[in-house]
Image: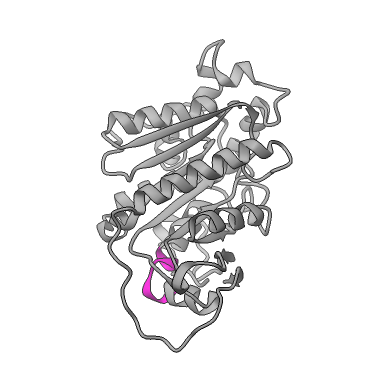
Amino acid sequence: MQTPAMDPSANPNPNPMHQVPARAFVNEAASGGWAQTLVLNFHGGGWVFLGSGTHDAVARQLAHRTGAVVVNVDYRLAPGHAYPGPLQDCVDALKYVTSERGVQLLEDALGCRIAASKIFVSGDSAGGNLAACTTLSVRDSGNRGLLQRIAGQILIYPCLSRALIDGGGADSSYNKFAEGYGLTKDDMKWYWYQYTGVDYDDDSPGVEANVEYAALVDTQASVSMRGLPPTLVLLADHDVLKDDGEAYAGKLRAAGVKVETFVVPNTIHGLWDKRSLDKSGQRIFLHAASEFIASRLSNAPPKPTRTSSRKGPLSRHASVS
């Protein structure tokens, strides 16, 4: 998909009109040729790895369960494209795919109509960070029309704090599961540095302001979370990032945001896109995400009636860029 030019004042390394690759998935059996909604998904991988197909299988599952069009976005990766580059890609992708032109492109590629009056953002791990930060960026940009269309955000074990790596105490998830459970404490120190360019424990004056749309749990109380859409937070109980998700859920609740938190017991980080890690855990996550989407669509306005000569079954997959 073609994204709009970025504001050079907000990007130290502007790359105007760059291409953000993405793949879209839809359930072939979508009733009446309509996809129920649009889900924009950002993959995990510490902002450094994965993408280009790593999350396609779970996107297909989510599309199958929800009747939604699920769009996997391949944002640029750190450290070659550090903060805020990946976030800007995600914001630009959201603006584009929800625009009239973007929806039409998806409909043409997939051969279906899309009920896009209500949409969702989702992501796992670093992608959960990007999903949360994308929504907050939209709110702070003053784009009320787009913010009101975001019916919910689905954050799957999101990484949202630098401070909790060392500041959570002996019983914190970072210390209890520091190693031996897949993602490690040292991994997260390294990932945060690759993404932000500063050490995780650097509290020098101005650092927090420079990564304002990254470590959302660590932002000062003056940075309000009010007005954000209902949120589903999905967590693994043996995961260094468990406290990140719970802390952000608490911050949202304190701001009056409706939040659902679900913790899958006896499982570890990575089950969302790696079915082999925990098949039943992934099914639980998919079911919770599907139920959340259905509940948020229950009062959606009816699909618009439009005349079209296009008929036939829905395609399951299309690449757009």
Residue 265 position in % (x across, y down): 59, 25
For the record, the magenta segment spans 95-102
Q: Nearer the viewer, residue 49 or 300?
A: 300
In the image, is 258 to the left or to the right of 39? left
Q: Decide whether residue 16 is among the magenta residues.
A: no
Q: Position of residue 279 (x, y in %)?
A: 68, 39
Quarter of the figure with residue 8: bottom left
Say which residue appears at 30% left-offset and 49% top-offset.
140
Residue 124 visible to an observer of this rendering: no
Majority secondary structure in the magenta region: helix
Instruction: Between residue 186 and residue 259, name the one nearer to us.
Output: 259
Q: From this view, report whether residue 299 is shown above or below residue 310.
A: above
14 or 279, which is in the foreground? Answer: 279
Colouring mode (rainbow / by chain / secondary structure / one colour): one colour
The answer to which image quadrant residue 246 occupies is: top left
Residue 53 visible within the image: yes
Residue 4 location in percent, x, y? 44, 69
Count the marks. Answer: 0
The C terminus is located in which quarter? bottom right
- Image x and y of residue 210, in percent: 43, 40
Q: Is 202 rendered above or below residue 20?
A: above
Instruction: Identify the residue shown where x is 70% and y is 22%.
Output: 179
Q: Residue at x 31, y 44 (%)?
A: 228
The vertical placement of 17 against 309, above or below, is above
For the view shown, which residue lies furthest in the top direction? 170
